[in-house]
Each structure stands twice: as structure tokens, then as C-alpha cells.
Amino acid sequence: MTKQSTPALGFIGLGNIGAPMCMNIVAKHPGDVIVYDMNPAALAALEGTKARRAASLAELAGAADIVFMSLPGSAQVEAVCLGAEGLAAGQRRPATIVDLSTTTVATARSVAGRLAGLGVTFVDAPVARTAEAARRGDLSIMVGASQEVYERVEPYLRYMGSDITLCGGVGCGQVVKLVNNALVFEHTAALAEMMVLGQRAGVDPALLLDALSKGSGDSFVLRNHGRKAMLPRTFPAGGFPPEYALKDISYVSALAQDTGTSVAFVELAHRYYDAAARNGFGGRYFPTVIEVIDRNIGPTPA
């Protein structure tokens, strides 16, 4: 790839958020886009587009200059980047790997260091907001990279996000994303508590949210998770379940331990979502934590 040429982009992981992110890349990038998912059925989302399917990670690594990944977590990111059949295993490697997943900070920095030794630049760029925002190309993306590398990948991140923030060096994107998610999980559980309390004390839940939205209790969580999920008690499968919340919370706890930080609210949130996962609400959209509160089945004591 010369400085003037259009890079070939790769995308790995066509899940609930990954598929719409990839669709935006395919629609907006003037060059080649090569895609891979270990589940062939996931590729159906790109049927009829210009995206070219790769049969393996090696094939994708051999064709793409910049590779984006949207994967379940740390273990998958490490395997895809550095495994025996991963992106860095062959003779031809992508110049840059951009990880849109949520991982531990330690994983981001470790993978970046090992890839650097192989001549590959690694960027952590986890995303926030909803699947609807992913479809619109309106995500918030938090980036960990040097200024030079950020300027190189930022135009392609704009295909997927409207708010792109350079948070610091490698790993800092994950720091900000984990803080964001912890606040969302904590606030969702706190709002669920207050919605149940308000209803039991005689206030209609819809009226409660309307009143709160006009004062200092308003928030993104209230307007989205509160109104769209907890108020109608609609928690579809296939979204972001309590199990995923527990994964991210475990990453926050690991970071807290590494930095010697007390995170009591994170620990309480863990107990709430653990109760949801253990009491029949696993696999359903995580604001289902309100059902745990309403049925007096959690959280378990510390």
C-alpha cells in the first residue's frame, strides 16, 4: 500500500454490533473490504454487497492493510491476533489492527507489545452506544493510540462513529470504555431499584420517568434503557445480556485491582447482574435486572 493508494480494509466479527459497523464500512469505503466470521451464517448480513468473504484469518491477513475486529472479549482478541492461525501467523500481515471489542486494559497493552515486535501496529478502539447507533454509523469510539497512528485510522473510524475520542496511548481507549460501561450498569441497576420503589409507593412508572426526565435525575440510561426496556418490561434475547455485563464488570474489577482502586459500586452491580444470570434472565437484554429487583431475588449479599 502506497501513501496515495486506498487501503484494503478487513473486518472480523459480524455480531449484533459488528455486522452494522461492517455494513457502514462496506457502504462508505471506496476500496476493497474483506470480511470473516467463524460462523458462516453471520456473513448473510452482507449478502449482495461488495464485501469479499475470506475463508480464513490467513486469507484476510494476506489481503487487508487495516483490519478491524469486533469480538466477544480478551481471549478471542488474543487468539485472532496472535494464535497459531491468527492474523500475525503468516508471512503477510496487516499493517494495522484496530480492535473495536471490549477487553481488559492489560490484554490491549500486551497484544500491542507483541504485535509491535512483528511489525504490526495495534489500536484499541472500543465502541459505545446501541445497536441502533451502530446501524446509523453514530457510535462513540474511544481510541488508544499515538497521535500519528490515530490520524491514520481516524478517517475509517468515521465510517462507524460520529464521536471519535483519542483517549491516550494504547490501552486508554479500553480504560474509558470500561468506565463508561461500569457507569451504565450501575445506573441501570440504580434506576431499576427506584422504578420498583416508586411503583410500590403508588407512582405510575411512566409518570415517574417523565418527571425525572425534567429534573437532575435525567440521563441517557433513563431515556434509553429506562423508557425502551424497563418501562415496557421488554428484554429481547440476542442483545447485550447479563453475562456480557458480568464480563465487562470483571474487566473493571481487574483494572481496579491493578491500580489499587476501591470500586464498591462495581461490586454491587456485579451481584445484581449475577443474580439476573442465575435466576432465569440469562441471555436477555441486561436491563432485565429490574425483574430481579421486582421479584426480590437479588442481589446476593457481599
Image: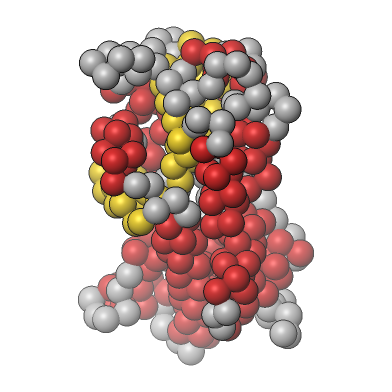
Quadrant of the image occupied by residue 87: top right
Q: Residue at x 39, y 16 (%)?
A: 8
Relative side of 216 to 91, left or right = left
Furthest residue toward bottom: 201
Q: Residue at x 50, y 73 (%)?
A: 186
In the rendered image of this protein, does residue 39 appear above or below residue 301?
Answer: above
Residue 43 rendering spot, x and y as whole percentages:
56, 20
Residue 182 rendering spot, x and y as whole percentages:
50, 67
Q: From where the camera sits, is residue 160 visible?
A: yes
> How many numbered badges does the structure rendering display?
0
Of the pair 33 and 210, the residue shown nearer to us: 33
Residue 294 rendering spot, x and y as whole percentages:
61, 76
Furthest residue toward front: 117
Q: From where the camera sits, is residue 30 visible?
A: no
The C terminus lies in quadrant: bottom right
Q: Residue at x 54, y 57 (%)?
A: 105
Q: Residue at x 23, y 16 (%)?
A: 4
In the rendered image of this protein, does residue 290 appear above or below residue 285?
Answer: below
Quadrant of the image occupied by residue 61: top right
Of the pair 90 and 54, the residue shown nearer to us: 90
The N terminus lies in quadrant: top left
